[in-house]
Every structure is written in C-alpha cells, then in structure tokens.
C-alpha cells in the first residue's frame, strides 16, 4: 500500500506491505494465526477500505510469524489477488498458483519441478496434488491467501467439482485457505446452490472486520506520526478521530493532511485556522469516498441512515457491520455532515456538477468534476499540459488527468491528432507502460486519463542522488534500462515510436513489498506515449518542426527528419549515459546549440569521467549514440542485454 503522498508515512489505498506501518487488528491477527497453527481455514469479511488486503500481507511477515509460534522457513504464505482473475478458466488457475509458489521457494529441485510444471501449462489436478504433496513431504506448509474472493466465487468456470478438489488439498495435505471478501462466502454463493453445496465452503469460519476500537485508532495516528519530524499532539489525534472516525482508511487520509500541515509550518502544533484548513482538505477528498460508499448501499440502508432513531437492534447491527455506524451514530463527524447534505439533496434534488464552464482558472482545476473524474490536486505543469490527481468514484480509484493547454486548441488539426493518438495509446498493454484509461473533451478542453502512479520520476531520483554525490547502482541501471527497453520494443512492435524518451518521462512506481524483500524498491514506468505525435506541426524547440527535448533528442530528430525506433534507442542511450556519469553527453547555452552537437559532435567518452567503466560499457554507449541510426542497436532489448553482460563481466 502506497503513502497518500510521496514520502508520507500515511497510506490510503493499496496494501500496507511494511510491518512498521501496520497498526491494530491484534484480535483478528491472533485468530488467523490460531487457524494456521491448527490447519483450519478462515474467511476475512469486511467492507472495502477496512484493510483486509493489508491484514493478509501483514500476517505473512516472518517476524510476526515467529512471534506467534510459526517457523517462517517451514510456512509459505502465498498471497494471490483474485481481482484480475474474474474471467480466467479453470485450466489457467493452478499454473498461475504454482508459478507464484515456485518464485517463493529456495533454489533447488523442488522449486525447479514446480516452476517447470507451471510453465508447461495444460495441468491436471492430479499433477497439482502430486507437486503439493512433495511440498508437504519437504515439511513446508502452504497457506493460500485469496484476496478479492468475490471475483473467484462468481466465476462460472469454477464448478462444485473444482471446489471439491480444493477441499481435498486442505483435508489430505493440510493446505490452509484464508479468503478476503466484502461479502460472506454464504452470501457470495447463495445464488449458486450447487456451488454452496460444495464441502469446500463448509470448512471456513469468519473473521469479521469493522471499525477500529478507540485505542487502535489512536495507535494508528500516534505510531505513524512517530516516524515523522512532528509527532501528533494528543489533542490533534482526538480531533482527527472525531472528524475521520475510527475507520482506518479515513484515518490515513486525515493523518496525511495533518502531517503535511505540520511539515509546512515547521511546528509541533496547529492553531485553529491551520486546523480548519486540514479539516477542509480532508473533507474535500473524503467527499468522493463518501459518495462511493453511499452509491453501494441498498435503498433500505440509505433510508435507515436517515432514521436511526427508529431502527430495530438487528437493523442497527447491520449498519454497524457495514462500518457505517459507531454505536448508534454515523461513524464520523465528516460522514454525519455528508448524510445531512444527502438528506437535503433527497428533498430538493441533485446539484449540478461543476465543470470547466464554472472554473475561472483553467490552470488550477482543483475541485471541479471533469467527465466522471473529480480533480483533487495539481501534480505538475508543463509546456503542453497540466497534470492533476483525480478520483473516479464509479470505480473507486485514483487517476492522473492530463489537461492540454488551451493554446493548443488554436491548431485546427490538433483535436483530430489528439483523438487518433489517444486511441492508439489506449490499446497498449505492458507492465512498464503507463495505462491510458480514458480521454475526452469538455468545454473545448482536451484531457486524457491515466493510471495514477505513486512515486517519483527518474529525473527527480537522479537529482536527489547528485545532491549526495551519488549515482544509481549498476543493478539499478541495468534494471531501469531493461524495463524501459522492454516497453519500447513492445511499442515499436505495435508501430508506435515514443519520440521523447527522457528521465522526466520515466516514473519509478513505489513497490514497498519489493523493498521488504531487499529488492529494488520501484518499477520503471514509461509515460507520455503519443504526446509528441500529437504535437507534430507545432514549433516547440525553435528549430523548425522538431518536436522533443533537446538534451535527449536523436540527430535525425534534431534535423527535423522522421523519428523511428532507432531514435528512441538513441534517447535511451542518453538516459543511460546520464545514469552512468551523472552528466549529459551534450550541453550548451541554448537548445539549438545542443541540437547541433547531437548532429555533429561525438559524445565525450564515459571513461574520462568515471573510473570504473569497462571497455564494453564504453562501446555500448558509443553504439547507442551513433549518429547513424542503422549502426545503433536493432532493438532496445539488444542494448539492455549487452548492458547486463557488460556489468556482469
């Protein structure tokens, strides 16, 4: 789970993977470990945003296992997010499980056997059982943590016989299943009587998640703020709990805003004016989440929330189970205010959405609704567009929204190019390419919507390293180049050239689970595909019709020629050069002078700047930065492979 903002200790959407930042749920943790020790299965049931995924991740941590009497060297907690498996077939499930299982095993014959079987595919259940029997014979206990179980239980490809097979693994081999879902397993399978009759669902006991206790809520805020320069004063903690409630998700959001406010003011406490600003910022973001909760409710639940004084005890318990009530009142001051507004809306009708037409400053669109996306905050401004963080309530997700500058509307062909290129980019599917989700026009403004990536750009990371007189490690350099090379080859195979490869267009998505395993703590993601094609015909660099960033531009782009795959490989070579040396190959007083150097001059040898550079690495850079595109690497992966070999050698 990622922090609410870069470098924050507070989290608000994805799983918490670092045990230092997980607080509370001791009773539930104890129940889950007790089940594992006694080879029983458990179903974690709770509304969204209550921390089910984080709880699953937390119990897999080795230190916590030891604390509760488990030996991590003999217990494998395998986490599987089933949300992306709603349409998979029965034949695809077990190869996926075994592939992930093999990755968690130590090097050896068993790992090779399971890994090879997963890759081979076409796997029958008897083969799965034999492999897991070998796992059991090696004194290894398997705990399968199946998150987002709704996606699995409602997949018609999995019939009662499949669940019977899963049940047999629990009975014969002691496989422990821990599921996590919003609805109970009984509710999920009620409409499928044949599925419900499977003995698999009879082996589960429920562990229900609802609101935290007062003590847990305080510990969330106190423990997390203790990791910051300004721990929260007790009265601030109480005020946060009052406005956000004991709901872990809303506590995290509110804590993030208080953390920022204390850091901005450099003090350990806030006056009333500053506190009111924190409260206002929190409620502005919480509003969309409240709406999402509201839209998921049945009509009776909505009506009951307006008439709490009339509810029967069982109706009150139902709303408490949905984490909507604390005792007999709305779970938080902020949610209570939201309900009061909804009561008014119910009486007078829905208000009109705010759009660009009512925004007086198109450079600051915070708070407006753009299509189905609520604009939350500014992420950055560029010469061609402004980028905002947004929230899509219908799918309960954060997004990045790029709004093109109004000056671009003066080009009569730009809108057509925008639509054409957006349609092409939206079809790209690669783990190292940012996913475009949507695009459109509102009040003559063009915008595109992309997945929101929590992290910093490679440009920002390199700047931080330079301040400390450091460079990326060789392992990082190979990892980044290999990742971006894979993205480029995929795009080139789909006849798409990026045209503007540079560190500012490479995001480093935070991966805390990788960091916890001692691996590189980020995944490189290439952004801004198609933007340069949209800009064709506009003069952006002062050198005619060249489009791009002079520092990283290929000679053919600098001359105004058509850019091809070789142009991207050249630019990737410049990025590699900068990571190796901490400097650009060409610098000058003006952008035009830099372009001339790209066309006419050879880059300085990296061996004159860095002592530990091999002849092979020097040759790789010379080839990547060749003036003649035909002499460069044919594919980006050829560059990455040569680089890995050079560093390994």
Image (tube, grey):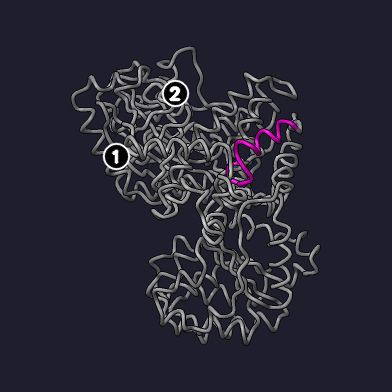
Q: Residue at x 29, y 23 (%)?
A: 357
Q: Main secondary structure of the magenta part?
A: helix
Count of residue discs: 2
Horizontal side, residue 130 vs residue 61: left or right: left
Q: Taking the image as drawn, is residue 567 in sight?
A: no
The x and y percentages for residue 537 are: 24, 24
Check the image and name the residue furthest to the left: 412
- N-term mark: 1 or 2: 2
Horizontal side, residue 8 vs residue 406: left or right: right
Mark 1: which secondary structure?
helix
Q: CA distance from mark 1 to mark 2?
A: 20 Å
Q: Is residue 496 above or below residue 297?
A: above
Horizontal side, residue 215 vs residue 255: left or right: right
Q: Is residue 341 above or below residue 522?
A: above
The x and y percentages for residue 64 are: 76, 60
Whether the magenta-drawn stretch holds residue 242 is answered as: yes
**Which one is nearer the viewer's eye here, 169 or 641?**
169
Label 2, on which residue? 381
Magenta-highlighted residues:
235-250
Label 1, on which residue? 422
Whether the magenta-drawn stretch holds residue 58 is answered as: no
Mark 2: which secondary structure?
strand
Check the image and name the residue furthest to the front: 310
Q: Taking the image as drawn, is residue 639 in sight?
A: yes
């Amino acid at each position: 789970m990622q922090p609410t903002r870069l470098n924050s200790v507070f989290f608000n959407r994805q799983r918490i993977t670092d045990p230092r930042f997980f607080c509370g749920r001791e009773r539930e943790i104890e129940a889950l470990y007790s089940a594992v020790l006694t080879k029983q299965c458990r179903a974690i049931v709770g509304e969204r945003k209550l921390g089910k995924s984080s709880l699953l991740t937390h119990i897999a941590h080795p230190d916590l296992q030891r604390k509760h009497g488990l030996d991590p060297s003999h217990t494998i907690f395998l986490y599987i997010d089933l949300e992306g498996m709603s349409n998979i077939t029965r034949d695809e499930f077990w190869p996926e499980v075994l592939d992930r299982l093999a990755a968690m095993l130590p090097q050896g014959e068993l790992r090779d056997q399971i890994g090879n079987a997963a890759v081979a595919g076409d796997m029958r259940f008897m083969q799965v059982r034999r492999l897991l029997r070998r796992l059991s014979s090696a004194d290894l206990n398997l705990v399968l943590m199946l998150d987002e179980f709704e996606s699995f239980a409602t997949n018609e490809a999995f019939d009662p016989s499949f669940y019977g097979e899963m049940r047999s693994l629990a009975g014969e081999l002691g496989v422990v299943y821990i599921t996590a879902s919003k609805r109970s397993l009984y509710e999920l399978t009620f409409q499928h009587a044949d599925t419900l009759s499977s003995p698999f669902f009879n082996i589960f006991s429920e562990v229900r998640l609802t609101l935290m206790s007062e003590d847990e809520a305080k510990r969330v805020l106190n423990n997390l703020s203790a990791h910051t320069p300004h721990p929260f004063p007790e009265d601030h903690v109480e005020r946060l709990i009052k406005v956000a409630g004991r709901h872990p998700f809303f506590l995290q959001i509110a804590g993030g805003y208080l953390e920022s406010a204390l850091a901005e003011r450099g003090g350990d406490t806030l006056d009333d004016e500053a506190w009111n600003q924190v409260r206002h910022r929190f409620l502005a973001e919480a509003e969309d989440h409240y709406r999402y909760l509201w839209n998921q409710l049945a009509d009776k639940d909505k009506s009951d929330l307006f008439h709490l004084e009339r509810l029967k005890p069982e109706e009150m318990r139902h709303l408490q189970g949905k984490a909507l009530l604390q005792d007999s009142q709305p779970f938080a001051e902020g949610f209570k205010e939201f309900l009061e507004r909804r009561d008014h809306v119910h009486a007078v009708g829905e208000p009109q959405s705010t759009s660009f037409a009512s925004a007086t400053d198109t450079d600051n669109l915070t708070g407006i609704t753009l299509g189905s996306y609520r604009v939350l905050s500014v992420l950055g401004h560029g010469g061609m567009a402004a980028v905002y963080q947004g929230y899509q309530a219908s799918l309960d997700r954060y997004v990045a929204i790029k709004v093109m500058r109004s000056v671009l509307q003066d080009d009569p062909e730009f809108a057509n190019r925008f639509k054409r290129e957006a349609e092409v980019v939206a079809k790209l599917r690669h783990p190292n390419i940012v996913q475009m989700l949507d695009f459109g026009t509102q009040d003559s403004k063009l915008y595109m919507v992309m997945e929101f990536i929590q992290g910093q750009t490679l440009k920002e990371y390199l700047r931080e390293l330079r301040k400390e007189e450091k460079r990326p490690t060789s392992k990082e350099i190979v990892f980044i180049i290999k990742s971006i090379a894979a993205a480029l080859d995929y795009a080139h195979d789909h006849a798409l050239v990026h045209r503007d490869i540079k560190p500012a267009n490479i995001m480093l998505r935070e991966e805390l689970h990788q960091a916890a395993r001692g691996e590189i703590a980020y995944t490189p993601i290439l952004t801004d595909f198609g933007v340069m094609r949209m800009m064709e015909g506009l003069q952006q660099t002062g050198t005619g019709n060249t489009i791009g960033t002079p520092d990283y531009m290929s000679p053919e782009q600098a001359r105004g020629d058509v850019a091809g795959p070789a142009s991207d490989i050249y630019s990737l070579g410049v990025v590699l050069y900068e990571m190796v040396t901490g400097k650009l190959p060409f610098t000058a007083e003006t952008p035009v002078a830099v372009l001339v150097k790209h066309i006419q001059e050879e880059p300085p040898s990296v061996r004159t700047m860095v002592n530990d550079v091999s002849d092979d690495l020097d040759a790789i850079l010379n080839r990547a930065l060749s003036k003649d595109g035909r002499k460069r690497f044919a594919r980006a992966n050829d560059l990455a492979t040569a680089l890995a070999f050079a560093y390994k050698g």
